[in-house]
Image (spheres, grey):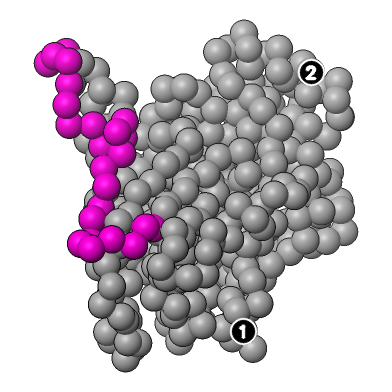
Amino acid sequence: MEDPKANSDTASLSSSSSSIIEHRAYARVGLLGNPSDVYYGRTISFSLGNFWASVQLRPSDELVIKPHPIHDLVHFKSLPHLVNRLNSEGYYGGVRLLMSICRVFHNYCRENNIDLHERNFTLSYETNIPRQTGLSGSSAIACAALSCLLDFYKVRHLVKVEVRPNLVLNAEKDLGIVAGLQDRVAQVYGGLVFMDFSQEYMDYSGHGIYTPMEVSLLPPLHLIYAENPSDSGKVHSTVRQRWLDGDELIISSMNEVANIAKEGRTALLEKDYSKLANLMNRNFDLRRRMFGDEVLGALNLEMVEVARRLGAASKFTGSGGAVVVFCPNGPSQVKLLEEACQKAGFIIEPIKVVPSPLNEEDLKTLSK
């Protein structure tokens, strides 16, 4: 399940501020508990080695945020070209994310009396994370950029690991992106992480309790996604308001989703994969009950059902657009699933889990 090159991929190319610095942040899969992370719940997530965003920081005379030639396209062959591009890619690329994390990082350092040198840099990025698949592509760009800034200014030891997901989240919130801490924790910590967002602790510390787990506890998993999925950023809207209004169905369901993550942690530690499969299915059933089929969308529902019809466990990786699948009956079941996905027009591939990129300097910042 591990990517042996992951640690070298996430490390900076040089520790010198006069050299190029480059970091990767990987897509993430919400295995259990989502979407309770924004409702004081619990989740289990892991970093997905199949897809990533990389950010490069190069020292320069002026501070430059470099547009991506595809994702930040502003030159078009024609009006239909512009419209087709917006229909498939949306209005926004990664430049706004890089700018926002720079501002959030600067403000955090100023508020916490962390001195920053005055040298400048150029930021650029690449990403292969499929858009609108609920794999946390936006936060991956911001997370990778934050790692570059920490190294360029040599302040990694002054910004606690627990705080870094909040900085990434704040950068996205400033842009109007609807999100919670789960994705950013998975990308900052890497590997497999159990997260407890209990309100009492959140109110006290400003962040959750994050417990890394061994990635070897995971069974073989698969990812299903569509080339043209729905927008994952809109799925929380009505449920959030109902939760704020005290809707009993939403509150009780979110509590059960949070407990599923807690039970899932035990199931993984005991390698009780039959229990894991049941919890994955139950997690999705609760989401479906809360959000309704119209909000989830027919395409997203079919991705889940194509696996369930074959006896596999399946649920969203995030807010829709991609599905994580566990085939308890092994390779023969996987083969049938691959054939079913091909027929339905879905992409399926084995999941690679990336171990944690945190180094000794990072670990020293963790709260004891």
Identify residue type, mark 2: Lys
Q: Is residue 315 above or below residue 96?
A: above
Q: Is residue 286 above or below residue 336?
A: below
Q: How far across and down, in percent of the image, does residue 113 sit?
A: 32, 91
Q: Is residue 167 left or right of residue 86?
A: right
The CA span between labels 2 and 1 is 45 Å
From where the camera sits, is residue 2 visible?
yes
Residue at 48% from the left image edge and 38% from the top image edge: 129
Q: Is residue 312 left or right of residue 223?
A: right
Q: Is residue 73 magenta?
A: yes
Provide the secondary structure element on which disc 1 rests: helix
Residue lying furthest left in this view? 79
Q: How far across and down, in percent of the image, does residue 241 sit?
A: 31, 55
Provide the secondary structure element on which disc 2 rests: helix
Crowding at dot 2, Cα within 10 Å, few <14 / some 14-19 / many 20+, comes out as: few
Q: Is residue 53 left or right of residue 83?
A: right
**Discs 2, 1 touching: Cβ within 8 Å:** no
Bounds of the magenta segment: 57-80
Q: Quadrant of residue 358?
A: bottom right
Residue at 65% from the left image edge and 55% from the top image edge: 8
Q: Which mark is residue 364?
A: 1
From where the camera sits, is residue 139 visible?
no
Q: How far across and down, in percent of the image, does residue 157 sit?
A: 51, 82
